[in-house]
């Protein structure tokens, strides 16, 4: 059936585009079926869109359209039945006007001729106005519909420089105004029917979307008639029972808002003042009382229309309002804004207004915050010496009132309701919190103190009042948001610390010690409590704040050990880690308690991996703050041994089926290794800390780790071996190999040694052994990455002979395997690039480099994978540059290029790769070209000329242009200007044109 319909549609479309299309349209329009009539109108659309249609043919089509509209609208009943066909016919008239507006002078007059045939084609405004008085209700409605369709189609022409807009301004707009002059007249006589008024407002809305957007010669400033018509809808009282009146008011408010948002200058100063006085004055107050604050009826659309206009007016006048808060008129406006903000109901569920009003209050507060210098000048100009005091007091009163409103709005709704709107309500709370940040910046410590006192007072009644619990939660939420946003500097922390002290010293946290983690509301309260605790890290650093850390951990530890609520446990673990990182010096005494928690997590495979990892980090951070190396190493030994024991236990339990290890078991083992990685990172001592140590302390530290009395290095290495060498099945798991290499990387370069600094030779031996057993291509990049890291940090201490042996066994002997996967190719070439960058002599003089590595790098230029090509290009840049190379190294580079004829080989492959590269990747090639030009100018010039003397390039660019390209490129001598020459060559080679350039 669908197939036949497609065939029929194709056939109809072909007929519509054929020379017989016009006749087909007439036939269809003459049928009784409305569907046939509509397809007839649609066929005329195709006829009008035909590129070969001339003016005479267009006039014939328009005449047909007008005739059929007349037939289909002989009376009201006929019009209603045929309206959807009539609308399509009207749209066709509009299309004809858009195509031939130079000759089709006035479609409005043509349309009116349907009802009054003897109207002259060039009838003026007065003549048109006379005609209007004799139109029936149906004819006026049809005219309004046509005006709406006409301007909507014109609006689709986004080129406002088009002559069509001048034609509309000069020919159509005066008649459009005349229509609304007449409508305003009959409305003043109480003769405008509601249905006609509704259509008039819809049409006016279409025009008001168009008019403010027109620029250039077609500016519309004379809209007084339209404003007068709209304003008539404000003259009557407001009744919540008359739906028709409310619908008209809604449309009126929407139109005025459209004008103010798109081009407020269309309204004169007087018109704006009149509008503001209406919307913000008695009429607006009556609408708010009768409709917006009426909780018994559903007036969402009317409320939204008023709020939109209300906010637009306030935002346009925010500067003026901000300076006149002591003026009674402004105070009345702000009082109305406060009433709207405080509308009853739960945000998102019962009311949407407070969220909308938030935009204004935040902007209003920002005026004061961003323009303090302006207000300083403003105060200086006032004669009243008490003016500033009164002004600041009023500003404080306003924002204190707003803050109290939103503080109540922040309260959690009933659990069942909250569950339905959790995401939306949380987004609302976040927006409100952003507002409170602005309020805090204005009211400073006074506001924070007020919130703190609310929190202390409310916490006294937690066990007896759910209302107080919700108040406390809302207050904690505000304070934690302020803390997190503002406490970056010591001065800010010092300002807020006394308030935190006042809160904690009341025993605030103890009120939650026996708090039940029950339904979603209580869970949310606990989540906010944890975030509040986290945000007070600045206070825990103080001597008074550190005393309360035990109370904080009494809240946090039970939550992170509670497997029933993973979300809350994750939040608690995040907070614990943050506190430990920020206050580690005060937490050494907590290590035994924390050790019990960490070991318990370590032995529990069911514990969330991220929580386990965070707590190990927390433990490591505190342990790191212990200055005594022996004390610290004992703790380190305990952690490493516990991980080794837990890992061995799991591996032994599944030793017979390591190939079929369960996902949960793999995740647990991976988590253990992650813990070890983070212990390794956390146990290192920074260069700054080393520089602050006495020389004898450095020697003591170095000697200790040289002896390693607790055999931590051996334990670490045994763990690494067990996961990546001893058990072949585990060694093929990329996640385990990655973690093992990260553990070893963490110890590389430790100036004074550490429990993870196993030594360069041990790492190289490990890499060799691991490469021998691996069969999984995905593990190889981690092996090469480990060696690359070693070279990057320890290149001065590496032995060329050992490096040659390493390269032979992990690269040359595995070359066929490496070439099977682009990721392995990249990792290998990255290693060699790093060697050439750091210490070229480690591989430069070896036969492997000349015979194998260079061939590998040349072949890599032809790779299809961008990430491989980028690494290859980096290799050639490193080889040609060798920034850390000696004079002898550079001389060897010259010999290699000369003896192996590398300039010609590399240039040929480089040009081929460059031409086929994407434009966004050209910059990766530039440095190689420039290095070749600078280092081997004569050889490169000859090689380049040979490489581009290729049939395709000659055909696309031309021989002379190619010669000119070589000349221009060599003139740059490898400087940055070569980039532009190369880019223009690439454009020409690929058939593109760069603006402002015609030649290479």
Image (spheres, grey):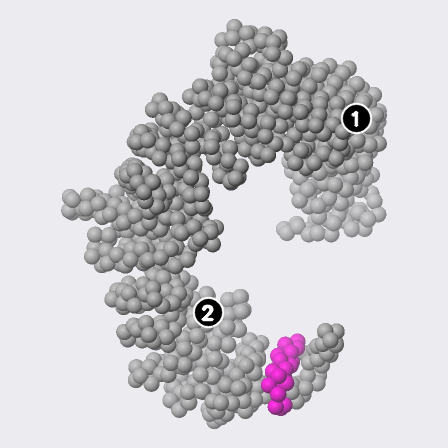
The residue sitting at 37% across, 26% down in the picture is 548
Rounded to the nearest whole Å, what is the CA distance between mark 2 and mark 1? 73 Å
Q: Is residue 378 visible?
A: no
Q: Is residue 842 left or right of residue 692?
A: right
> How many callouts does the rendering have?
2
Q: Residue at x 71, y 32 (%)?
A: 734
Question: Residue 210: which disc?
Answer: 2
Q: Find out whether residue 955 is within the magenta segment.
A: no
Residue carrying label 1: 773
- Provide the secondary structure element on which disc 1 rests: helix
Q: Quadrant of residue 556?
A: top left
Residue at 59% x, 34% y is: 606
- In terms of depth relative to the viewer, which is nearer, 123 or 317? 317
Of pointers 2 and 1, the one earlier in the residue sequence: 2
Crowding at dot 2, Cα within 10 Å, few <14 / some 14-19 / many 20+, comes out as some
Q: Residue 681 in the image: state x and y as whole percent.
A: 58, 24
User: Residue visible at 56% across and 14% down?
Assistant: 633
Relative to 617, does residue 909 appear above or below in the rendering? below
Position of 23 compared to 939: left or right? left
Q: Position of residue 866 (x, y in %)?
A: 72, 40
Instruction: Specify the principal SS of the magenta part.
Output: helix
Of residue 809 and residue 731, the one placed in the foreground of this image is 731
Residue 735 shows in the view: yes
Badge 1 crowding class, 10 Å Cα cut-off, few under 14, some 14 to 19, many 20 or more, is some
Position in image of residue 491 (x %, y %): 34, 29
Q: Residue furthest top?
A: 696
- Residue closer to the observer: 978 or 83: 83
Q: Are marks 2 and 1 in contact (CB under 8 Å)?
A: no
| Magenta-tinted stretch | 30-51
């Amino acid at each position: 059936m669908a197939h036949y319909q497609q065939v029929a549609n194709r056939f109809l479309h072909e007929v519509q585009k054929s020379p017989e299309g016009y006749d087909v349209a007439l036939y269809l329009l003459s049928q009784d079926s409305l569907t046939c009539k509509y397809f007839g109108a649609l066929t005329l659309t195709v006829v009008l869109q035909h590129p070969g249609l001339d003016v005479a043919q267009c006039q014939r089509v328009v005449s047909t359209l007008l005739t059929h509209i007349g037939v289909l609208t002989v009376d009201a009943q006929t019009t209603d039945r045929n309206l959807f066909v009539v609308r399509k016919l009207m749209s066709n008239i509009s299309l004809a006007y858009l195509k031939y507006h130079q000759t089709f002078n006035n479609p409005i007059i043509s349309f009116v001729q349907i009802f009054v045939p003897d109207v002259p084609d060039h009838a003026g405004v007065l003549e048109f106005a006379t005609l209007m008085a004799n139109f029936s209700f149906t004819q006026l409605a049809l005219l309004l519909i046509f005006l709406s369709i006409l301007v909507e189609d014109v609006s689709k022409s986004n080129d406002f420089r088009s002559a069509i807009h001048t034609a509309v301004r000069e020919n159509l707009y005066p008649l459009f105004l005349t229509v609304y002059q007449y409508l305003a007249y009959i409305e003043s006589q109480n003769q405008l029917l509601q249905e006609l008024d509704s259509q008039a407002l819809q049409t006016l809305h279409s025009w008001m979307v168009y008019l403010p957007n027109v620029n250039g010669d077609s500016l519309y400033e004379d809209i007084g008639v339209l404003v007068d018509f709209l304003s008539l809808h404000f003259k009557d009282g407001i009744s919540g029972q008359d739906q028709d009146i409310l619908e008209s008011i809604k449309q009126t408010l929407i139109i005025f808002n459209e004008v103010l948002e798109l081009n407020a200058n269309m309204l004169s100063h007087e018109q704006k003042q009149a509008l503001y006085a209406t919307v913000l004055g008695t009429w607006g107050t009556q609408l708010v009382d009768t409709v917006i604050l009426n909780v018994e009826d559903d007036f969402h659309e009317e409320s939204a229309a008023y709020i939109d206009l209300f906010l637009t007016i306030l935002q346009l006048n925010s500067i003026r309002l901000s300076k006149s808060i002591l003026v009674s008129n402004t105070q009345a406006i702000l009082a109305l804004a406060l009433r709207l903000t405080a509308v009853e109901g739960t945000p998102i569920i019962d009311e949407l207004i407070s969220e909308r009003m938030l935009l204004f209050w935040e902007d209003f507060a920002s005026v004061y915050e961003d323009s303090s210098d302006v207000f300083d000048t403003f105060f200086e100009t006032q004669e009243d010496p008490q003016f500033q005091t009164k002004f600041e007091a009023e500003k404080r009163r306003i924002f204190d009132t707003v803050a109290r409103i939103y503080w109540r709005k922040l309260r959690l709704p009933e659990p069942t309701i909250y569950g339905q709107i959790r995401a939306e309500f949380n987004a609302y709370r976040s927006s409100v919190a952003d507002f409170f940040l602005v309020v805090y910046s204005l009211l400073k410590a006074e506001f924070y103190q007020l919130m703190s006192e609310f929190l202390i007072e409310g916490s006294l009644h937690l066990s007896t009042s759910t209302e107080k619990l919700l108040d406390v939660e809302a207050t904690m939420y505000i304070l934690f948001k302020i803390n997190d946003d503002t406490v970056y500097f010591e001065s800010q922390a010092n300002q807020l610390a006394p308030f935190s002290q006042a809160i904690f010293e009341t025993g605030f946290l103890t009120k939650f010690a026996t708090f039940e983690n029950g339904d979603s509301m209580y869970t949310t309260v606990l989540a906010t409590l944890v975030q509040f605790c986290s945000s007070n890290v600045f206070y825990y650093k103080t001597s008074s704040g550190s005393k309360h850390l035990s109370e904080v951990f009494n809240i946090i530890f039970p939550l992170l050990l509670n497997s029933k609520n993973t979300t809350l446990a994750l939040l608690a673990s995040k907070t614990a880690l943050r506190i430990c990182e920020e206050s580690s010096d005060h937490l050494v005494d907590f290590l035994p308690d924390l050790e019990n928690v960490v070991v318990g997590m370590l032995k529990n495979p069911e514990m969330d991996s991220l929580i386990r990892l965070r707590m190990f980090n927390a433990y490591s951070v505190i342990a790191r703050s212990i200055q005594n190396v022996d004390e610290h190493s004992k703790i380190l030994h305990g952690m490493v041994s516990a991980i080794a024991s837990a890992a061995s236990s799991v591996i032994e339990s599944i030793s017979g089926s390591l190939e079929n290890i369960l996902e949960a078991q793999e995740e647990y083992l991976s988590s253990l290794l992650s813990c070890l990685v983070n212990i390794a990172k956390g146990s290192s001592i920074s260069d700054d800390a080393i520089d602050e140590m006495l020389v004898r302390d450095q020697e003591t530290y170095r000697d200790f780790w040289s002896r390693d009395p607790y055999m931590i290095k051996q334990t670490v290495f045994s763990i690494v071996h067990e996961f990546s060498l001893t058990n072949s099945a585990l060694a093929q798991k990329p996640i385990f190999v990655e973690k093992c290499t990260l553990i070893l990387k963490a110890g590389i370069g430790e100036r004074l040694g550490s429990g993870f600094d196993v030594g360069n030779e041990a790492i190289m031996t490990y890499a060799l052994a691991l490469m021998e057993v691996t069969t999984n291509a995905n593990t190889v990049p981690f092996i090469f990455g480990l060696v690359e890291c070693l070279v990057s940090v320890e290149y001065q201490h590496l032995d060329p002979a050992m490096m040659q042996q390493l390269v032979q066994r992990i690269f040359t002997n595995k070359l066929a395997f490496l070439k099977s996967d682009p990721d392995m190719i990249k990792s290998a070439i990255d290693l060699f690039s790093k060697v050439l960058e750091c210490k070229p002599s480690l591989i430069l003089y070896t036969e492997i480099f000349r015979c194998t590595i260079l061939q590998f790098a040349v072949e890599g230029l032809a790779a299809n994978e961008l990430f491989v090509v980028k690494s290859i290009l980096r290799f050639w840049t490193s080889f040609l540059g060798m920034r850390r190379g000696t004079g002898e190294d550079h001389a060897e580079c010259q010999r290699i290029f000369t003896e192996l004829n590398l300039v010609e080989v590399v240039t040929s492959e480089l040009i081929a790769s460059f031409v086929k590269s994407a434009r966004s990747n050209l910059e990766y090639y530039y440095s190689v070209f420039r290095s070749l030009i600078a280092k081997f100018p004569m050889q490169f010039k000859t090689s380049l000329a040979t490489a581009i003397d290729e049939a395709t390039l000659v055909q696309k660019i031309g021989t002379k242009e190619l010669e000119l390209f070589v000349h221009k490129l060599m003139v740059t001598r490898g400087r940055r200007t070569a980039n532009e020459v190369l880019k223009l060559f690439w454009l020409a080679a690929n058939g593109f044109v760069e603006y402002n350039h015609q030649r290479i």
